[in-house]
Amino acid sequence: MLPSLEKSAYEILSVPLKGNESIKSLETFIFLENKLLPFIDRQTTLIAIGGGAIGDVVGFSASVLLRGIPWIYLPTTLLSQVDSSIGGKTAINSTFGKNLIGSFHFPSLVITDTTFLKTLTKKQIASGLVELTKHALIEDRDLFDELEQNHTKILNDIDLLPSYIFKSIQLKVKIIDQDWFEEDQGTRQYLNLGHTFAHAFESITKNENSLLHGEAVALGLCAAYDLAVQQGACCVQDRDRVKNYLNSIDMPTYYQELLFSDKTQKYFKVDKKKKGEKITFILPKGIGKGCHLFSVSQPNTQKIFSLFSVN
């Protein structure tokens, strides 16, 4: 990619970054500011090549440098190709939690090249598959059926992935087109299915036994389906199918120890979706049947969670 850009008529400045969650910080933004501001103007285009963390921090930088400049994204992981590259959300992390500083700044162009996926481990592919599956759980039961039947083949042959990536992108775009900026009661909030739990789990484990984002989302989906069953929003059979599927792709499903951690309860107090003392959870209505919002006051979360069935 870089050699071909360097052969173009444009002046290229390359800034390497490590592709992990730790770079989503104010320190990285300041580093990029110092590297870029002496050389850029409002016609400059930033190009992010990497996974979701790279896309988030470069997209955020593009949204605020010179009050906003264009950017292009080449996502290189399955997770970023099916999820974070679509929808214009950019973010860095705060000391209080994940993605609490950010903006909506849509890239001018997203180039999804599945050749990049050949560099990923099977665990990284499975992690990305969780976000792909999330879209199916929200909107497309037939796609979930396909993933349930073919997951072993998909994990062992990434040449099968492009058609599933395309379907996943279509589903996310369909949801976002109805609600670009995640308005109150809008459908875009459905894309946070499992994520109120997942972001808490990811944040409290970041220093030891850290979870891949897909692993955290798998745990969050299990918690969301358990809560949905408890609230009568979803049948037990659909919940069990989802948990069995996540187990079958070697994603974790036991979350109770993390859920009842004091750190998790503290995280909920700063969750982006909270309103006053109320925390919002996205609950599935089943598989591919949409979602609805469930709000509970923070002091009552422990009581609600204590009613979860443990499987």
Image (cartoon, helix red, strand yellow):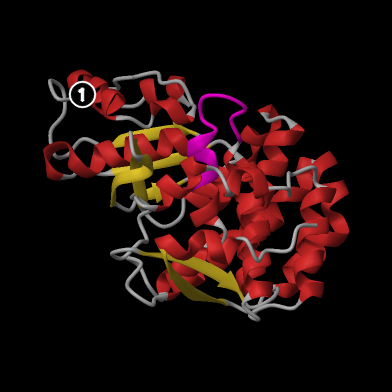
Q: Residue at x 40, y 34 (%)?
A: 48
Quadrant in the rendering for residue 124: top right
Between 66 and 137, the one nearer to me in the picture? 137
Point out the image quarter for the C terminus: bottom right
- Residue 88 horizontal/vertical position (percent): 36, 54
Q: Residue 229, located in which quarter of the rendered image?
A: bottom right
Q: Which picture quadrant has residue 226?
A: bottom right
Q: Along the horizontal axis of the image, is 46 left or right of 302?
A: left
Disc 1 crowd rating (10 Å Cα; few below 14, some 14-19, many 20+) is some
Q: How many marks?
A: 1
Instruction: Provide residue 155's location: percent of width, then percent of height.
Output: 80, 43
Please say whether residue 168 is one of the residues in the magenta stretch.
no
- Residues in magenta? 200-211
Measured from the top left, where is residue 288 in percent x and y? Answer: 67, 75
Q: Residue at 44% x, 69% y: name it.
A: 296
**Residue 142, image x, y percentages:** 76, 73
Residue type indicated by callout 1: Leu
User: Which residue occupies 35% across, 55% down?
Assistant: 272
Is 208 included in the stretch rendered in magenta?
yes
Q: Is residue 170 visible?
A: no
Residue 22 can be seen, yes or no: yes
Q: Nearer the viewer, residue 160 or 276?
A: 276
140 or 311, which is in the foreground? 311
As displayed, is residue 208 above or below residue 43? above
Taking 106 as reference, is 216 above or below it? above
Which residue is under mark 1? Answer: 36
Q: Considering the numbered disc 1 on the image, is that residue within a helix, a strand or a loop?
A: helix
In the visual, does 164 lie left or right of 206?
A: right
Task: Name the residue rendered at 73%, 67% in the picture.
Answer: 143
